[in-house]
Image: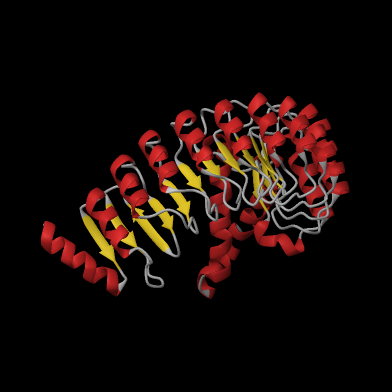
Amino acid sequence: MVFSNNDEGLINKKLPKELLLRMLFSLLLNFTWSNPECTKYVHSIGLDSFCNVAWNILALDGSNWQRIDLFNFQTDVEGRVVENISKRCGGFLRKLSLRGCIGVGDSSLKTFAQNCRNIEHLNLNGCTKITDSTCYSLSRFCSKLKHLDLTSCVSITNSSLKGISEGCRNLEYLNLSWCDQITKDGIEALVRGCRGLKALLLRGCTQLEDEALKHIQNYCHELVSLNFQSCSRITDEGVVQICRGCHRLQALCLSGCSNLTDASLTALALNCPRLQILEAARCSHLTDAGFTLLARNCHDLEKMDLEECILITDSTLVQLSVHCPKLQALKYLTPIYLFVSSTRTHQVQPGRHFLASKAVVVFCLLSCIHIYILDNLTVGVAYIFFSLFF
């Protein structure tokens, strides 16, 4: 016997199941699209039947389904589909994405949590039917969970965070973006239990204030990524607290936090030397002084979004070019994009006329060898500069 539903078949011993699945899938496709003569021959020797049987045996083996992404089938996925998957895969399933599956609710996810207790990565982005009940189920049965995305699950409240903190203490990544019922009380409950968090995304959690950031600073010292986009109640006081407690921070989004001043940039410069990504779009009170200090202390900066930071001038670009050699992408004013490759080649994407073409040229002259500019006006300016200096 060359194939069987047990481990005695020769082919089972020689090849990994993942490879067998790929081979059988390819063969089944070829039966469908090959010429009629080939199909007739394959059928005559029974190879098509063998492949169908073998495929069914492997496909129904839960150990072969450790990672499942249903995003491409989101409109067709209902609760019973998730329940059937959980029963078939059981403890083998490690990663499941239900992003955009709006038909999935609390009941099916309770069944899932009961059956798939080894789940580590769960994406529920856009599953708008789920409520705190789902988080209670995850807390009770899924203690190994490390990555949880609850983006736009708008019925989630502080109670969910309390449950997660009690049962999912291994959590490293949590996305609560646009869960606008979350307040400082929920954040406090969360961080008391999940002290190993490395990434916490809170975009659009508009009720959060500085006290929530103080709780994060007190308990989550392993954080490397934070996102407070559009958390408009946050002030310098909260950002300073975060910087003092989260020295490993590498990525920070403060876009839309319109109350911030250079005091926040100063705190970042003095406390977060590993910072690589800073998004500060629409923070209209930030100035050259703050970015100068940041550039001189955070030499690992790779990406920055400074769109609509209306008080900064060419001086900021010059400081970044001098002190931040790893800078790969800069979005400055509206709409300037600079990209730096590993060969130190800068490219400026096309758009409307640049509002600071001189700054672009100075930036490029100070920090690169090759320039590819697609704006006619800036090309002319760059040509003149190159004629003078090279």
Up-down: is 386 above or below 273?
A: below
Is residue 119 visible to us here?
no
For the point 81% across and 59% down, the residue is 103
Q: Nearer the viewer, residue 329 or 236?
A: 236
For the point 63% across and 36% down, the residue is 238
- Image quarter in which the N terminus is found: top right
- Image quarter in which the C terminus is found: bottom left
Image x and y of residue 338, in percent: 36, 57
Q: Nearer the viewer, residue 16 or 292?
A: 292
Side (left or right) of 309 relative to 302: right
- Is the image coloured rainbow, by chain, by secondary structure, or in one colour? secondary structure
Side (left or right) of 123 relative to 299: right
Is residue 246 visible to us here?
yes
In the rendered picture of this protein, how many numbered marks are placed on residues? 0
Image x and y of residue 371, in percent: 24, 60
Q: Nearer the viewer, residue 58 or 124?
A: 124
Residue 87 sits in quarter:
top right
Residue 176 sits in quarter:
top right
For the point 47% across and 43% down, the residue is 277
Image x and y of residue 170, in percent: 68, 27
Side (left or right) of 321 relative to 276: left
Image x and y of residue 284, in percent: 53, 54
Residue 113 sits in quarter:
top right
Q: Nearer the viewer, residue 157 or 31?
A: 157
